[in-house]
Amino acid sequence: MQCGTCGSSLERPGDYCLVCHTPNCDTVIVCFTRQEADLTMLDGNTHIGETTITTTPEHNGEAVVVELRNFAGRVADEIRRKRPEEVYAAGDREVLREARAQLHYTFYRVPSENPVEYVRERQGKRSLDVVQRQPKEKIGGSHTTLIGGRPGQNAIKVVAGHPHVKKIIPGPIDASGTGSQSGLRAKVTRADTNGNVRLLLRDGSSVQENRIVTTAMDRESGEFVGDDLNDALAEAELQWMTELVGFIHAVDINTIIWLIRKHEQLAAPGALELDTGELLAVG
Ligand SMILES: [Zn+2]
């Protein structure tokens, strides 16, 4: 394929031209399965080309992690060399999440069925607005208390940091639940017909339902924002666990016990189990 501006030959379809410094596509749409990533490059509404990247999924332990990371890395490299303005992604969430983590692009989520047609139909129409306000300026309403302590606040911060979240309105706290599990649980609900969602915070027997106003106009686009938020919350929790495990390697056993007791409320039960295993290894 040749550069649409200067005619230099490009290694792959839709590559950014390094001779005349001109992009050859503005949009990449990537559809993931666990074995394959199909990339379609568009420039405006013009179809520029397609590329497929495949992998052979591994099945056990560390090999899976390495293989998934390499696969996602190759997809990320392929997208990066196009220097697109927008990236749309559909399909396998595990690979999608890993590719997004490596790429630092906002992935706009689209349905797996005919994702290219979906994007083309919407080209030129209003895409979801990006809210420029600072995360803390997005929180409002008459209830200012949040449950879950610092993890609760972190969950709110993660949600408020999303570009399509306009406002978070904390709800009243319901302490009449029967749950006894300690540790914060944060989950975003399905979207309503206006594209807005709710962030459910659960901490022991307390539940708080917080309204999240998004820039989505309908249920379908609201669902994509909701999926993104749930992914971001899961990532934030994983990050916290990784930090804790890293920290454990750096300190002595008494500090570790103190730390675990102190943070019992913060960590997910899974994290504590993992950390106890690390503890045994250290002790
Ligand atoms: Zn060129």
Image (cartoon, rainbow, N blue to C red):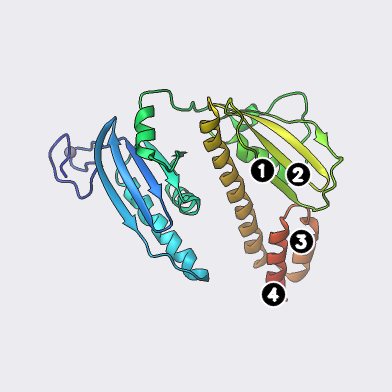
Quadrant into which the N terminus falls: top left
Q: Amino acid at mark 3?
A: Ile
- Farthest left residue in view: 7
The mark lying in front, picked from 4 and 1, is 1
Task: Say what amino acid the circle numbered 1 marks.
Answer: Lys
Residue 21: x, y in percent? 23, 38
Is 190 positioned to the left or the right of 1 in the image?
Answer: right
User: Secondary structure beneath disc 3?
Assistant: helix
Residue type at mark 2 is: Arg
- Tag in front: 1 or 3: 1
Residue 52 in the image, given as x and y percentages of width and height: 30, 52
State the CA–CA distance, disc 2 to disc 4.
33 Å
Q: Earlier in the sequence, mark 4 or mark 1?
A: 1
Per the image, label 2 sits on a secondary structure element best described as strand
Is the residue marked by circle 1 packed among few (<14), some (14-19), or many (20+) residues within 10 Å?
A: some
List x then y, in percent, for residue 121.
Answer: 36, 29
Residue that badge 3 annotates: 260
Are circles 2 and 1 on residues that touch, CB within 8 Å? yes
Q: Which residue is under mark 2?
A: 202
Q: Residue beneath label 4, please?
A: 282
Between disc 3 and disc 4, whose residue precedes?
3
